[in-house]
Amino acid sequence: MNKFHKIVFIFAFIVYGITAYQSSGYYHADEHYQIIEFAGSKLGTHTSDELAWEYKAAIRPALQPTICYLVFSILHFFHIDDPYS
């Protein structure tokens, strides 16, 4: 990686960090619902028929539901089973 790319990377990292720190809230409550419900399909608490059309169309990224799945699996180990608490 040359010097120019390093400068651009560092600048982008700083801008994204400031943006993430300054951001608050969300655009729509549906954002949280679909992450939890998509993770629930992997945990077995929901079937794919119960999910929004985006699930079957496979148009949403899988990173956040995967993180949610991992968190819920860890919490289940400690007998915390309510994802909304």
Image (spheres, rainbow, N blue to C red):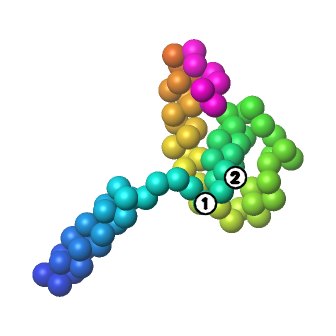
Prevailing secondary structure of the magenta residues: loop
Give the quadrant of the C terminus.
top right
Find residue 40 and name its label.
none
The magenta-colored residue range is 79-85
Residue 40, picture quadrant: top right
What's the distance in space between the residues labelled 2 and 1, CA to CA? Answer: 9 Å
Mark 1 element type:
loop
Residue 53 part of the magenta segment: no
Q: Nearer the viewer, mark 2 or mark 1?
A: 1
In the image, residue 33 sits, relative to residue 5, either above or below, namely: above
| 22 on left or right of 31 | left
Residue 82 is one of the magenta-drawn residues: yes
- Residue indicated by mark 1: 27
Tell which residue pokes out farthest to the left in this image: 3
> How many discs mark residues in the rendered view?
2
The local secondary structure at tag 2 comes to: helix
Which amino acid type is marked by label 2?
Asp
Which residue corresponds to mark 2?
Answer: 30
Q: Where does residue 37 sit, x and y in percent of width and height? A: 71, 43
In the foreground, 16 or 39: 16
Q: Residue at x 51, y 16 (%)?
A: 78
Look at 58% across and 38% down and name the residue there.
69
Quarter of the N terminus within the rendering: bottom left
